[in-house]
C-alpha cells in the first residue's frame, strides 16, 4: 500500500514484495534518506520499536511526494518514496497521538448511541411481544422472508443464528441465571439486546418495519428511519475501526451516511 505506485497501461502493476527486514535504527536512517526531518533519533527509534513502522507510515503517507501521470488517456497519481520538504517525524507522531485520542472520544459517543438505540428497540417492540426480535411477522419482509440464494437463509435467520450463539456461549451472570431458571425459554427482547454488539444492532434495525424505524428516528429528530439506518451502519464501521485500534483520521468510510432530507437537513447544515 505504501510503496511506490507503478502504472502500466492504465492499471496498477503489482510486483513481488522483496523489501528486507530493517531494525528501528535502520528504519530511522531510511526515513532520513527520504527527506524526513528527525531531530531526536533515539526517541524516533523508541517510537518505531513501540508502535511499529507500518502503523506509523499511515500518518506520514500524505506527506510523501506525488505526481500526476497520464496513461491511455487516464490520469493517475503516482506516490513516491520521498517526503515533501519540511516533513518531520514529530509532526507525524503528533497525528498518531491525535488519532488515538480521537478514537477514544468517538468510542465514548458510540457507547451512548449503542445503549440508547438498543433500549429504544426493546421498549418499542417489547410491547408487541417479549420475543419480538424472533418473530418475522413483526419485522420487514425483506429481512424476514427474502432468502439468500447462496446461504438458503433469510437475513433474519442468519441474524438469529448469531443471537442464539451469543446466548449459548455467554458467561454473563444474567444469562446463566436465565438458563438455569427458564431452560425452555428464549431471552425476551429487553434482555437479548444486552448481548448485541453494534453490528447486530445496526443489522436488526435495518430489518425492522419502516414505521418502527421511523418512530425511533423521530426520537433523535432524524427525518426517517432509513436515514438513521445508514447512520448506524456507518457508525458500526467506525466502531470496528476504533475497536481494532486502526487509523480513523483521514480515512474514507466504506459506508457513507445519508444526509437528512428537507427542513431537517437545512436546520442541521
Image (cartoon, rainbow, N blue to C red):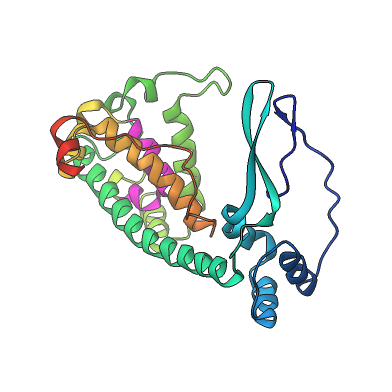
Q: Closest to the observer: 75 or 96?
A: 75
Q: Residue at x 68, y 59 (%)?
A: 54
Front one among 138 and 95? 95
Find residue 223 and report its image quarter: top left
Residue drawn at x 59%, y 56% as measured from the top left: 63
Image location of residue 52, percent across then percent down: 67, 66
Q: Quadrant of residue 185?
A: top left
In this picture, which residue range is highlighted in magenta? 191-207
The percent position of residue 13, horizontal first and vertical second, equals 77, 33
Q: Is residue 197 magenta?
A: yes
Above or below for 214 versus 115: above
Look at 73% across and 71% down and name the residue there: 28
Image-quadrant location for residue 226: top left
| Relative image position of residue 99 (x, y in whole percent) | 47, 62
Q: Residue 86 in the image: x percent, y percent?
A: 58, 65
Q: Is residue 254 left or right of residue 263?
A: right
Residue found at x 63% / y 24%: 74
- In this image, 213 relative to 166: left or right? left
Relative horizontal placement of residue 183, taking residue 74 as reference (left or right): left
Magenta region, main secondary structure: helix
Q: Is residue 182 above or below residue 60?
A: above
Residue 8 in the magenta stretch? The answer is no
Which is more toward the observer, 50 or 65?
Answer: 65
Amino acid at each position: 500500500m505504501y510503496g511506490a505506485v507503478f502504472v502500466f497501461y492504465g492499471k496498477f502493476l503489482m510486483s513481488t514484495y522483496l523489501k528486507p527486514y530493517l531494525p528501528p535504527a535502520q528504519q530511522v536512517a531510511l526515513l532520513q534518506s527520504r527527506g524526513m526531518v528527525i531531530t531526536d533519533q533515539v526517541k524516533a527509534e523508541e517510537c518505531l520499536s513501540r508502535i511499529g513502522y507500518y502503523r506509523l507510515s499511515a500518518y506520514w503517507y500524505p506527506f510523501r511526494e506525488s505526481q500526476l501521470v497520464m496513461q491511455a488517456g487516464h490520469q493517475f497519481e503516482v506516490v513516491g518514496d520521498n517526503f515533501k520538504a519540511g516533513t518531520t517525524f514529530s509532526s507525524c507522531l503528533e497525528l498518531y497521538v491525535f488519532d488515538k485520542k480521537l478514537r477514544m472520544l468517538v468510542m465514548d459517543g458510540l457507547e451512548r448511541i449503542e445503549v440508547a438505540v438498543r433500549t429504544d428497540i426493546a421498549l418499542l417492540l417489547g410491547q408487541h411481544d417479549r420475543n419480538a426480535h424472533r418473530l418475522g411477522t413483526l419485522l420487514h419482509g425483506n429481512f424476514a422472508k427474502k432468502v439468500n440464494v447462496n446461504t438458503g437463509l433469510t437475513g433474519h435467520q442468519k441474524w438469529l443464528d448469531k443471537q442464539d450463539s451469543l446466548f449459548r456461549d455467554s458467561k454473563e451472570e444474567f444469562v446463566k441465571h436465565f438458563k438455569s431458571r427458564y431452560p425452555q425459554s428464549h431471552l425476551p427482547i429487553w434482555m437479548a439486546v444486552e448481548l448485541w454488539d453494534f453490528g447486530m444492532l445496526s443489522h436488526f434495525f435495518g430489518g425492522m418495519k419502516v414505521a418502527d424505524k421511523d418512530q425511533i428516528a423521530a426520537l433523535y429528530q432524524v427525518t426517517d428511519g432509513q436515514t438513521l439506518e445508514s447512520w448506524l451502519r456507518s457508525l458500526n464501521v467506525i466502531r470496528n475501526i476504533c475497536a481494532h485500534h486502526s487509523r480513523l483520521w483521514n480515512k474514507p468510510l466504506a459506508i457513507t451516511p445519508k444526509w437528512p432530507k428537507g427542513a431537517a437537513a437545512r436546520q442541521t447544515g
